[in-house]
């Protein structure tokens, strides 16, 4: 049994995990910077990289201690090298490369999106190829045909905002702190999703594309037309209605894709896949086996990076130490 150290610093969370080659998570530590960024209403790249620098060695140590593992017992180092904020990615990648060269351990750069895409297979090793991977996060909304490790075809993606980004921007209109997605979910529990109607976008040129900018503008117009008191009183209905529109659009696109391909099932991943309304709608309306990561593995974490890194390592072996960080890394690269 091998041990893999995963390091993830692509955005605003400093995350380190130790997992085994059989997919057992020995530790999965996350130091969130949400409180620092909430006051600016979004992520400030300079603040994020400075915080990663402060935290990285402490979080690595914590992950090793909690896994009852020493550095000499680590067999592979997996680190996110894109996509993400360059300054943030560099902190994790430089740290991982230093560890690799000091300890003489193999290293592999991992695509953050591949980390999300394969994360449901940690909890559900029974998922078999081909499956439909649905990444719903703060930066991406993509439906992907997954035929094997590294064999990915994007079948549908958003033309504008990612679904998590749309939720965060909608939250900002109602002064809900960043990241707004989980808070909108809580507020929506007290609301009626049918009060405000945010119709499905009609996209002529790309049949399966998703788009969230139209409902964002519609929400903005409704909110601007309200007094501060009305906004407060209707907050739960607004959140429930907006959340419903976002999740229903995702489910609708999946329903359109299912008859066209032979998927064994649908595997959701990314921060928005933690959302219970999305989970309920998927179970009710998707006529295929549906898989979700555990909630802690939905949002950014390093266990998924260690897992994806190990899967890639089995196929491609380690990387040379001079691999770059790529802020706009695509899944196909
Ligand atoms: O995957 P993730 O942690 O980071 C990215 O790679 O983007 O996703 C973060 C996004 C944020 O937009 C956040 O608002 C959203 O996921 N999110 C949620 C929930 N938890 C996180 N959206 C809806 N419901 C949730 N429970
Ligand atoms: Zn992510």
Image: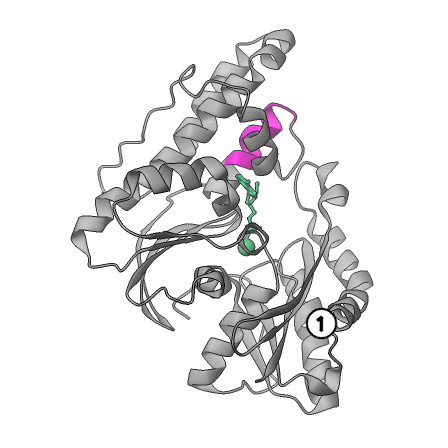
Q: For the C terminus, which image quadrant?
A: bottom left
Does 172 lie within the magenta span? yes
For residue 208, which quarter of the picture? top left
Q: Between 90 and 18, which is closer to the camera in this rendering?
A: 18
267 displayed left or right of 287: right
Residue 161 x %, y %: 46, 41
Q: Between 131 and 136, which is closer to the camera in this rendering?
A: 131
Please give the residue where the numbered disc 1 appears in the rendered image: 67
Residues in magenta? 167-175
Residue 273 visible in the displayed image: yes
Does 297 lie within the magenta span? no
For residue 98, which quarter of the picture? bottom right
Relative height, residue 225 to residue 46 (above, below): above
Marker count (numbered): 1
Residue farthest to the left, as pictured: 260
Q: Between 81 and 188, which is closer to the camera in this rendering?
A: 188
Q: Residue at x 17, y 52 (%)?
A: 260
The way the protein has been coloured in the rendering is: one colour
Relative height, residue 104 to residue 244 (above, below): below
Q: Residue at x 31, y 52 (%)?
A: 289
Residue farthest to the bottom, as pictured: 104
């Amino acid at each position: 049994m091998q041990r893999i150290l995963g390091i993830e610093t692509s955005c605003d969370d400093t995350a380190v995990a130790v997992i085994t080659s059989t997919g057992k998570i020995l530790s999965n530590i996350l130091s969130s910077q949400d409180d620092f960024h909430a006051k600016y209403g979004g992520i400030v790249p300079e603040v994020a990289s400075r915080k990663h620098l402060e935290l990285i060695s402490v979080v690595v140590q914590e992950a090793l201690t909690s896994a009852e593992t020493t550095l000499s017992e680590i067999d592979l180092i997996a680190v996110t090298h894109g996509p993400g904020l360059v300054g943030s990615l560099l902190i994790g990648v430089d740290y991982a490369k230093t560890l690799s060269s000091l300890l003489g351990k193999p290293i592999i750069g991992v695509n953050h999106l591949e980390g999300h895409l394969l994360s449901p297979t940690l909890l559900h090793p029974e998922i078999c190829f081909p499956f439909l991977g649905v990444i719903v996060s703060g930066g991406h909304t993509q439906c992907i045909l997954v035929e094997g490790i590294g064999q990915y075809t994007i079948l549908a993606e958003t033309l504008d905002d990612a679904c998590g980004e749309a939720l965060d921007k909608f939250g900002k209109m109602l002064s809900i702190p960043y990241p707004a997605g989980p808070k909108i979910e809580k507020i929506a529990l007290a609301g009626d999703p049918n009060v405000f109607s945010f119709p499905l976008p009609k996209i002529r040129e790309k049949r399966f594309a998703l788009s969230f900018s139209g409902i964002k503008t519609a929400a903005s117009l409704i909110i601007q037309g309200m007094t501060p008191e009305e906004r407060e009183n209707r907050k739960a209905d607004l959140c429930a209605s907006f959340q419903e529109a976002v999740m229903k659009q995702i489910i609708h696109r999946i329903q359109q894709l299912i008859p066209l391909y032979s998927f064994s099932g649908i595997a959701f991943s990314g921060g928005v896949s933690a959302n219970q309304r999305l989970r309920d709608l998927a179970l009710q309306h998707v006529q295929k086996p549906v898989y979700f990561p555990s909630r802690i593995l939905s949002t950014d974490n390093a266990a998924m990076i260690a897992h994806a890194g190990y899967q890639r390592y089995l196929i491609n072996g380690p990387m040379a130490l001079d691999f770059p960080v790529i802020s706009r890394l695509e899944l196909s690269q």
